[in-house]
Image: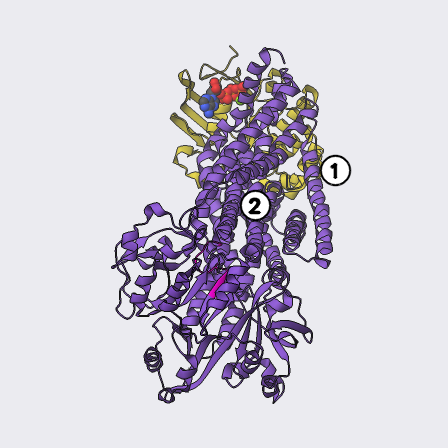
Chain colours: A purple, B yellow
Amino acid sequence: MNRAEPERLGGVIRALLSHYWRHPWQAVFLLAGLVAGVALWSAVQIINSHARASYAEADFVLGAQASHWIRSRSGAGVAQADYIALRRAGFRQVFPVVQARVSTADNAPLAIIATDLLALPAGMAGEGGDAFDNASLDWQAFVQPPYQAWFPAAVASELGIAEGEQLALHDGRRLPPAVIAAREQQGRQIFMDVGAALSLLGRDRFTALAVGPASPDDVARLAAALPADLMLDANQQRLDLTQLTASLHTQLTAMSLLSFAVGLFIVFNAVRFSLWYRRPTLRTLRLVGVSVRALALAIVAETLAWSVLGSALGLLAGLGISHALLPSVSASLQNLYGAVVGADLLLDPVTIAIAWGMTLVGLAFALAWPLLLQLRGPVLPGGSASAGVMAEARARRVLLVGAGALALAAAGVYWQMGTVIEGFVLLGLVLFAAAWALPQALASAHRLLGRALAGAPLVQRWIVSDGWAQLPALRTAMMALLLALTANLGVETLVGSFRTALAGWLDQRIGADIYVNSAQLDTRRFVADPVNADWLATAHARTGVTIRWQGRPTKVYGLDITTPDTRALPLAQAEPDALARWAGGDRRILANEQAHYLGGLRLGQTVTLPTDGGATDYTVAGFFHDYGNPYFQFYLPREEVARRWRDVQSTGLALWLKPGEDNETAEAALVAAGAQPGEWFAQGDIKRLSMKIFDRTFAMTAAMNTLTLLVAGAALLTALLAILHERLPEFAQWRALGVTRRELLRVIAVPLALFVTLTWLAAIPLGALLSWLLIHDLNVMSFGWSMPMLWSPQPALKLGLLSAGIVVLVLMIVLSQLTRKLPQAMAQLGSAQ
Amino acid sequence: MLSVSGVVKRYAQPEGEVTVLAGVDLSIASGEAVALLGESGSGKSTLLHLAAGLDTPDAGIIQVGGQALAAMDDRALAALRRGTVSLVFQQFHLIGTLSVADNIRFQAALCGRLDAAFEAELIDRLGLATQLDKYPHQLSGGQQQRVAIARALLHRPALVLADEPTGNLDERSSGAVMALFRDLVKAAGSALLMVTHSRDMADYLDRRLWLREGRLHHEPG
Ligand SMILES: Nc1ncnc2c1ncn2[C@@H]1O[C@H](COP(=O)(O)OP(=O)(O)OP(=O)(O)O)[C@@H](O)[C@H]1O
Ligand SMILES: [Mg+2]
């Protein structure tokens, strides 16, 4: 390269970029596409990697991640004296935990967790662990009356609690003064000192003692040292969160990649037109002797510049979006898996690098490649209008052939799909096969319509036939719209079906009037107490043990076979005396769907469970729905559980009231028996709460879907504005022929409306296919839940209206542009361009 | 048919305001064919645009068929252009998505004045009979221009405004098309105001005018 070259290169770059000065909206859209795609993708990446980091830290969560638990056999809690004795005996890794549920004055349930910070073993908090940073902690205030109640920021803002305020509870008690702290591992629980919790709750026993990291020797010594009424449990709840949540993260990633793809459609759109405008510039530059090499360098420089700008702005926007979406994602994670995700979001270098890389590759395909191809061609154009028409038809056919190939690949994947990732590959193949087939489908439909209109008045035929002039420009936007509509429909049907299934399941499963889960209540005594006989119709005291099955913590519930909920099980209805034989020990077992779909268990198969008396075989007699549970679960009769396991816990009490009795009687009786307010839920509250949790869990999905649709709307706008600019002289000429403004608007709007309608129609069966795959394959593979697919026309109609709204909005923008630019174009008619 | 009096048109240019038309007076009778000549940049196209109502003058009055353009709103102007005034430009902007036959009928269909006999005559004389089912992109430039001429004349507009209609064609075919154009305008019974650079072409018409320094002259400068 000689010395003049760099200077010349600057000039070349300036000449190439001057185009954006004259058509700034093209630059805006190019950037908007990049930013939208990168932002949505990176938002999910940021959230995902943040969640994974939180899981690693979750090992330090007090209590929940302890290696062992010490509980009382009676369920009455652990006496303070026992705790002190253990500490004195040198078990420094033992610390007290108080957990309780209370209700606020407005009846909102609130979880309280308390421990003795000073007793926490090293590594669980304090030094090294970031769980509780000492700097912000005022030890004196924390451990002395009036104490402190640490609220996670999100909970505080939900409850409207400010720093220093004392939250009033349902029964008039007040929490200690609030300290608002974004402490990650706290989740949605209110954290306080163990002394504060005991005095607040009026208890003198801890819920349990947690055991920090302990060697097997320590565990053995600890077990030997326990008094008779305490038992040591390995913490079976300790989960491999990363494994459990993998499916959810895969789903989020898949959605974000879809958004990125839709964003790229905008880029392709914007670039297509800027290429078209810049063809003459490139030609001129070559004619005046600029070398191909200098032009290539300039193109590469431009591509690099766009990629840096686009990914930088996109990442910034992504950070903003992830902040907005994080609450709903952490809600999903917590609701589904009990995983707690903190609030600090950071961009890590890997995400930055991948975002930039993807942008660069996208731009290389969309911008650099076609420009470089043009450089290799002859200096003077050989193309004609007729070549353009043929090239367009060829492009449609090539896309259709590609769509066929993708569809074949999809069929191939479908027959041997085993993992969630393969499932998403399948969905991607299906979606893109449909998108690529769309242009040809639109062209064919349009041709048919043209034939049907053959006898119609010329002006009508003209308006419809203009679709041929718009299709090349609208093609990409329609593909983006199809992707967005299909994804929306598919996911809406999934969520709708799930919601209906869940509501039905809750109705069926939550049959009792009150559900109690109390650490204090002596369940057996309460049920047997004659003072309760007046109002209590039936009670179901479930028992349970946690075992490990297939390497996962698994709950085995012991059911009372006489209660209405057990008698409603299909097993009971199959044969008259099935339940009696079951309780008698016929070694049959019921398993949740998760054990079927994820654990591979089949009806009639033998399942071997570890019991205190050794491995025991059971025959699988049926499966039950168990939505929202990430674990495997089994049902056995209560008698059978008591026969096989020694340390059986009480796992809740369901109460049926006699007709005419109201909940208050029952609640008063519960309080009298030692239960605390907040430790029970009325039937309606549970259902309402479950549905609320469900809706929050899927808020993220809805948000991503709306964003994707917006991105598709932006693609539509770029396409229409490009059409407007390309065809302005033509439109002016038509006006000169006496075409009215209204007719002109009709020419623009009718074919557009036609294509959008056809795309929408195509999205309906595709969305159904997508939801079918999501419900029957993806969902089962991800979560192990099945449900009937419930197709309703409502989402399709809603999306149809939304698309119509987008079209109208876009047309209004186009119309205002047209009104502004047409007079000028008409005045310049006939002058050489 | 067309009456222009005292028309002034100024444009803002980087070096200041430029008066392109400085008081133009012109009158064309029904069926009369007038050639408009002048150097490049003298304002010929500007005058044509004003006459078609595509642009508005800074001063002066323009009347078509006795009606002042200044008094017309957008819709009335559209109606004027669809039925009364036809424009033929160097760029013909045929409608690419319609067949040649439909393109020829387009403007007549807009104003509801289809005339099968005249259509057959135009097609025959313009030599388009074998092209009717084709689409514009399948025609040569000369053929496209002939389609544009047929389109402009089929509904027999009272006034045809043509701006170098054959500027895109080579000299020989341009001469042939020119002669045909004039004859067909006569056959349609329209008045014609045509901008041209060529003296030869101007000689085909009834009258010649030169635009110079913003005014019309009857003699070349
Ligand atoms: N929209 C406009 N804005 C500013 N100046 C204009 C505009 N349109 C025309 N002009 C100027 O008005 C003058 C006359 O232009 P016009 O196009 O009428 O010339 P013309 O006689 O048709 O020339 P040609 O024979 O080259 O077509 C020119 O100097 C031109 O620069
Ligand atoms: Mg001119």
Q: Residue at x 40, y 63 (%)?
A: A97
Q: Main secondary structure of the magenta part?
A: loop
In this rendered view, identify the residue nearer to me: A782 or A325.
A782
The residue sitting at 36% across, 68% down in the picture is A81
Badge 1 crowding class, 10 Å Cα cut-off, few under 14, some 14 to 19, many 20 or more, is: few
Q: Position of residue A465 (x, y in %)?
A: 62, 45
The answer to which of A459 and A622 lies nearer the viewer is: A622
Is A28 on the left-hand or right-hand side of A571?
Answer: left
Residue beneath disc 1:
B130
Q: Amino acid at mark 1?
A: Thr
Q: Position of residue B18 (x, y in %)?
A: 41, 17
The chain to which mark 1 is attached is B
Disc 2 target residue: A262
Nearest the eye: A353 or A820: A353
Callout 1 secondary element: helix
What chain is tagged by disc 2? A
> Residue B107's x, y, as percent?
57, 40
Image: magenta residue range? A59-69
Residue furthest front in the image: A89
The residue positioned 52% from the left and 50% from the top of the image is A52
Q: Is residue B43 above or below residue A273?
A: above
Q: Is mark 2 within 8 Å of ligand 1?
A: no
Secondary structure at badge 2 equals helix
- Establish if A337 lies above or below B106: below
Amino acid at pointer 2: Val
| Cα distance between the residues tagged 2 and 1 | 46 Å
Q: Quadrant of residue B147?
A: top right
